[in-house]
Image (spheres, helix red, strand yellow):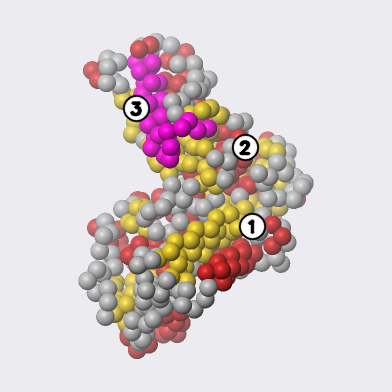
Amino acid sequence: MAPPSAAGTLRIGVDVGGTNTDAVAMSGNEVAGWAKAVTTADVTAGIVTAVRSLLAGDDLPTAEIGAVMIGTTHFTNALVEGRRLVPTAVVRLGLPATKGIPPFIDWPDRLRGVLGDHVYLCHGGHEFDGRLITPIDHGELRAAARDIASKGVRSVAVASVFSPVDDSYEHEAQEVLLDEVPELDISLSSEIGRLGLLERENAAIVNACLRPLAERTVAGLVEALVQLGLDCPLHVSQNDGTLMSADFARRYPVATFASGPTNSMRGAAFLSGIRDGVVIDVGGSTSDIGVLVHGFPREASTAVSVAGVRTNFRMPDVLSLGLGGGSLVRSANGAAAGVTVGPDSVGYELTERALVFGGAQLTATDVATAAGMAEIGDANTVDDLDGTLVGDAVDRMQDMLATAVEQMKTSADPVPVVVVGGGGVLVRDGLAGASETIRPDHFSVASAIGAAIAQVGAETDRVYSMAAMTRDEAMAEARSVTAQRAVEAGADSSTVEITDVDEIPLTYLPSNAIRVRVKAVGDLALDPANGSTQRGMST
């Protein structure tokens, strides 16, 4: 699984985590250097510090850096916290259908309050086989645009019934809305989500409310490169293990959701050589457990809830535990019985509050040091810990992880388990359910490595009616369109390959329709002329 870079060209991978910002330089298949820095509130300062430390510490020539790849949880955190979001209007095309279940119906109240109750139900939409529900009404849309503008709202999500089958009405609505109010910033559901109106509409709303933050964040990332004196392309990690351009990240910030665990899994696959197995990524506050399938993260097969909002855009199938290096360890009444680990954590304050760093809090890192599993900080500070307490805490951590691995496996057979992340020292060899426990070199910066080696990808997800074409014609069209989108996204056309094809016969529909999902990936094209225009996440 060689990284997609030309020989002799350095690629910088950066992972902006909740506690640390990691930076790694890759030269071909080799790690040329790595560095860590504390994550900062503005993201930019932490990236600059980490990369500057990397370049200085390993004496890397900036002239040989061909690209910088950054993975960040900035947008996910904004939605979870309900901060830095903007009021967003929803225009749904479907009347007279869909009135019974309006937009925002299942959203948490705190998020609905931030985004506002700006809902516009309009005529339009299609049936599953492409037949019209009702014609689109331009006058209705223009009135909606004027009302949206009068409220000072600029972010708009447009969702049409069955737009993955026919997205023409969403694009037509976008043109009408922008013609009436050119300042609107519009997200189309057909470019973001999959089948399922509410979940796809939710995904478009989430994307729309994050667009202004994405503009500021990407501008900050570009500024970081300027401060570092790097004149090279900037790419951002997507949540399927592939890359997107900075411009694409501005338009589709939701594509970054869960990119951290995804990068960790890709990095784990690269470092260990394991293409099928389980990955445990242990951070400062949580452990993310995912499954590798052919070297890529297994995708979630059901709707995924993010901050209480049901969505259906592509997301890795990840189980998160409240177990990390900063997790607090407690015992009932000071005794070893009833020991607990997490879910609360000291997080980025680990180096101030943990015992091994002179603090007063007993953390998982202290326990691992006392048990001889790690050499962190001042081991003398944990010499007096009760041995039974330490042993029970270690056993508790292993039980939590082993249970999570069993939950993610699809069979009872043991599987390879790759351990990565800065808190990977918490995992003992011989974990229950594992055929082998692998902790590869550079495991603590696997997420940054995953960003550095990432490829460019594209996806198609749509319904084809067999009344209009044969199955073979539909499959060929889906493959061709997906491969072309990968090239448009920046992939080298000579390296593009189809990695996944799912065909689902929709036997309950009268037109003998099929749903086809195709994914293509290719190496990043170093020649910028080889495609730079990115389209939607899926169609």
Residue 273 — which label?
2
Residue, x 56% and y 68% (percent of image)? Answer: 472
Q: Does residue 96 appear anywhere in the picture?
A: yes
Residue range corresponding to the magenta coloring? 389-417
Single out the residue that lies furthest toward the bottom: 139
Tell me how far mark 3 sits from mark 1, CA to CA: 44 Å
The N terminus, quarter of image: top right
Name the residue rendered at 29%, 80% in the picture: 95
The part of the image, by quadrant, that contains residue 344 is top left
Which of marks 2 and 1 precedes in the sequence? 2
Q: Which x, y percent locates residue 513?
A: 43, 70
Tell me the kind of residue under disc 3. Val
Q: Disc 1 residue type?
A: Glu
Q: Secondary structure at mark 3?
A: strand
Of badges 3 and 1, nearer the viewer stands: 1
Dot 2 amino acid type: Gly
Cβ–Cβ below 8 Å for labels 3 and 1? no
- Label at residue 497: 1
| Mark 3 neighbour class, 10 Å CA radius: few under 14, some 14 to 19, many 20 or more | many
